[in-house]
């Protein structure tokens, strides 16, 4: 799901988690050479955690800006180096069908979240902007932080902006009130202004497999929209199976078509796990050369425009699927994929933490298994200690 809200305040206070934890974690990380898009010849896979924005916007219980900032800091401490931190969306662009008081309150918190974050080194923080007005607000905040006033705060850690459209007119109109062609035309000056401001631009395309309004999507539509986004300056385009109906075969068909006009190194995958096929789709995409994937800690998210669609694939599950061998001392069995400094245990604990705040369980199966194993080991240790 792409439409973005910011975060409502509720009377929940941040925990005692502090930057000291993050600093300790950072010292143990080894940072690989990074690039903005990953080549098919590389075994390095970049994971973009979209939980703080795309995930939380679709959770029924909003949480406060301080907690969103803490979530982002925890993700960075767990080794995520690409994090979607929030959005700048005007209520004008939200369809009346979902423009509730809840949504209105959510749209005012991203600036506060950015001010509360503790920026991590070598980490990219992105914000979603739907149009020029959203970008203007981002640029205004950046300009204010560069004021000659000695009391001015340091600039918020925004390194890139994300722009979005869809592969079908029906979904585009439901999401942004305009057709695909109209949305692309509206995004051209946004991308140009962002690039002029030295910000990177990443594109999103929703409903690459099926649209909840118009059914099966022609892969050629995805190809054309992705090409347009690249031509307007996006360094990467994330292709979203918003409804979660994709299979390895259908994902392969879309990617093979899209790669006719766009270098596969500039494509990323964004798979919802509605039918339990997200990880299989990721591996199908890896075979075709994609090396960047969106995921959401704890499996946060959903889509108000796609009934029945569950959250994004859990970041923990992606990390485990790519590098789970590293958690066990198995001779001669090393992970094929390099995901950088991401710590699976810290990530699983972060997923459990934010899920508890939201009054739900993490939907990450790998996270659940790790936490259950950790709890069992602790009980055995306590039992052994009691016998002494």
Image (cartoon, rainbow, N blue to C red):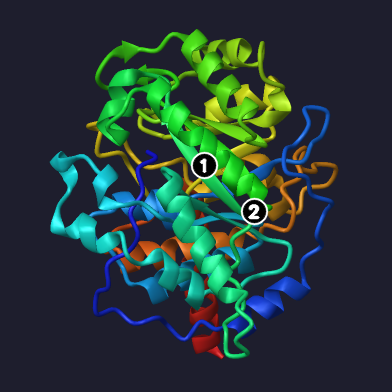
Q: Which mark is residue 197?
A: 2
Residue pictured at 39% horizontal, 25% vertical: 182
Mark 2: secondary structure: loop
Q: Is residue 316 above or below residue 67?
A: above
Q: How far across and down, in percent of the image, does residue 53 sit? A: 42, 54
Judge from the rendering whether residue 332 lies leftward or rightward of residue 160; answer left or right.
right
Pointers 1 and 2 in contact (C-beta within 8 Å): no
Secondary element type, mark 1 = helix
Residue at coordinates 48% horizontally, 46% vertically from top-left?
Answer: 314
Question: At x 57% / y 75%, what residue is drawn?
Answer: 145
Question: x%, y% of residue 259?
Answer: 66, 16
Mark 1 highlights which residue? 190
Q: Quadrant of residue 97?
A: top left
- In this rendered view, identify the residue nearer to me: 354 or 65: 65
- In this view, 148 is above or below 254: below
The residue positioned 42% from the left and 18% from the top of the image is 209
Residue 194 location in percent, x, y?
A: 59, 48
User: Of residues 244 and 334, which is closer to you in this image?
Assistant: 244
């Amino acid at each position: 799901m792409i439409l973005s809200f910011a975060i409502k305040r509720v009377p929940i206070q941040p925990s005692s988690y502090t930057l000291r934890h993050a600093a300790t974690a950072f010292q143990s990380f080894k940072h690989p050479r990074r690039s903005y898009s990953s080549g098919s010849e590389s075994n390095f896979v970049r994971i973009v955690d979209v939980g703080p924005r795309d995930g939380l916007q679709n959770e029924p219980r909003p949480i406060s800006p301080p907690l969103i900032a803490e979530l982002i800091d925890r993700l960075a401490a767990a080794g995520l180096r690409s994090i979607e931190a929030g959005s700048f969306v005007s209520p004008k662009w939200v369809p009346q069908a979902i423009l509730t008081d809840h949504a209105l309150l959510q749209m005012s918190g991203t600036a506060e979240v950015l001010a509360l974050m503790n920026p991590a080194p070598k980490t990219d923080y992105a914000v979603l902007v739907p149009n020029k007005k959203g970008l203007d607000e981002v640029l205004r905040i950046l300009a204010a932080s560069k004021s000659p006033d000695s009391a001015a705060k340091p600039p918020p850690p925004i390194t890139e902006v994300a722009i979005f459209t869809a592969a079908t007119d029906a979904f585009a109109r439901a999401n942004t009130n305009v057709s695909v062609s109209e949305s692309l035309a509206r995004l051209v000056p946004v991308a140009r202004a962002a690039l002029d401001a030295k910000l990177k631009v990443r594109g999103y395309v929703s409903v690459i497999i099926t649209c909840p309004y118009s059914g099966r999507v022609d892969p050629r539509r995805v190809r054309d929209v992705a090409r347009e986004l690249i031509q307007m300056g996006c360094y990467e385009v994330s292709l979203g199976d918003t409804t979660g109906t994709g299979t390895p075969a259908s994902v392969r068909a879309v990617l093979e078509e899209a790669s006719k006009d766009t270098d596969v190194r500039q494509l990323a995958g964004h798979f919802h796990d509605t039918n339990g096929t997200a990880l299989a789709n990721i591996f199908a995409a890896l075979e075709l050369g994609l090396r960047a994937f969106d995921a959401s800690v704890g499996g946060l998210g959903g889509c108000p425009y796609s009934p029945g669609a569950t959250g994004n694939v859990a970041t923990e599950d992606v990390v485990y699927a790519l590098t789970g061998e590293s958690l066990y001392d198995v001779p001669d069995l090393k992970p094929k994929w390099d995901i950088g400094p991401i710590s699976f245990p810290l990530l699983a604990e972060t997923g459990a933490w934010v899920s508890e705040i939201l009054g739900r369980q993490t939907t990450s199966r790998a996270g659940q298994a790790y936490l259950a194993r950790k709890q069992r080991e602790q009980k055995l240790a306590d039992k052994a200690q009691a016998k002494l």
